[in-house]
Amino acid sequence: MFSSTYPRSVSYGPDSAAPNEVSSRRELVDRRAFGKWLAKGRPRNTALQDWLEAEVEIDKELDMNSWSYIARASW
């Protein structure tokens, strides 16, 4: 079901979208998981663990941003 390595078709080079141009949560998670994988030295069979960790991190960041926005809007 899950590949042991990340897809080669995903672009992470200088021609890829800038961080402020990311269009979806999935893309944020994908980029974070890929970064985690690279930081670990590109080991085999860590895609699922990297993805799950990235989801938790991104969801926390998105939740914090939404609460920050709500707090500012209520002033």
Image (cartoon, grey):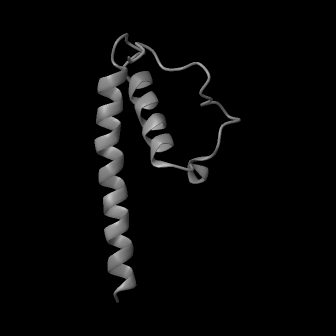
Q: Is residue 52 left or right of residue 25?
A: left
Q: Residue furthest right?
A: 15
Give percent across and percent down for residue 52: 30, 33
Q: Residue furthest top?
A: 44
Q: Residue at x 32, y 60 (%)?
A: 63
Q: Residue furthest bottom?
A: 75
Residue 26 spot, x, y in % from top left: 46, 42
Q: Is residue 45 above or below residue 33?
A: above
Q: Is residue 71 above or below residue 60?
A: below
Q: In the image, what residue occupies the spot 61% across and 52% down?
A: 21
Horizontal and vertical percent position of residue 30: 46, 35
Image coords of residue 71 (percent x, y): 32, 79
Please give the count of numbered marks on the rendered protein.
0
Which image quarter holds the N terminus?
top left
Q: For the point 68% across and 34% down, which residue is it? A: 14
Reply above or below: 11 against 1. below
Question: In the picture, residue 35 is in which quadrant?
Answer: top left
Residue 1 vs residue 32, the one in the foreground: 1
Query: In which image quadrant can residue 44 be found?
Result: top left
**Which residue is painted at 35% across and 89% down in the image?**
75
